[in-house]
Image (cartoon, rainbow, N blue to C red):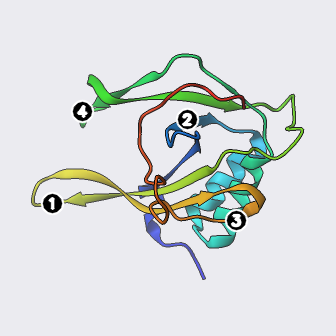
Amino acid sequence: MFASADTLARYVRVFIETPDQKRILINKLTYEQNDLLLNTMYYPSERNLNTLGASLRQTSFSASREPTQVTRFDQSGNPLAAGSTSYIVASARDDNPAASELDLPIIVELWEFSYDPGDRLLKASPKRTVRLVAGGKRSEPGTSPGTEPTPDTGAVPKL
């Protein structure tokens, strides 16, 4: 089976979920994890989603102390204004492998672009979201109280 031609219209976002249900955006991965992320984007199977999540759970991260504001852009790529969302940003550390599995859930989101010729707008929408908890177990967002993902950020836990 081959991936469809829409692979250029997909992207993957990954987060660490804090105990208060807030999200830390993972913006830099190791070289190997970048390959796993691309593989997940091109072939979004259960196996690839789980492999990416398991790799992230075994990683040490360094995080920013202050939230980074999201910026909105126009159709030409020029910045419009600050968005309403901000994130603490985390980066995977190549130099310091994790001593133990990360205790916080990892969220992997697969997004897809679609173009509406009537409105002449490009829209992004989530196609699939997976929440991976300790031991490689999965918990879909919204299946238990308090697991609805929120785009806000809170205090930085020890990563």
Q: Which mark is residue 137?
A: 3
Marks 2 and 1 sit apart, C-alpha to C-alpha, by 35 Å
* Residues at marks 3 and 1 touching, judged by CB atoms closer than 8 Å: no
Q: Residue at x 48, y 66 (%)?
A: 143
Residue bearing mark 2: 24
Instruction: Check disc 4 and give the amino acid type.
Output: Asp
Q: Residues within 10 Å of mark 2 (few under 14, many from 20)?
A: many
Q: Residue at x 50, y 55 (%)?
A: 109
Label 1 SS:
loop
Q: Which mark is residue 74?
A: 4
Residue bearing mark 1: 117
User: Residue 13 placed where, x, y %?
Assistant: 52, 47
Task: Report whether residue 78 is seen.
Answer: no
Q: Nearer the viewer, residue 156 or 113?
A: 156
Marks 3, 2: nearer the viewer: 3
- Tag 2 or tag 3, which sits nearer the N-term? 2
Q: Residues within 10 Å of mark 4 (few under 14, many from 20)?
A: few
* Residues at marks 2 and 1 touching, judged by CB atoms closer than 8 Å: no
- Tag 1 or tag 3, which sits nearer the N-term? 1
* Residues at marks 3 and 4 touching, judged by CB atoms closer than 8 Å: no
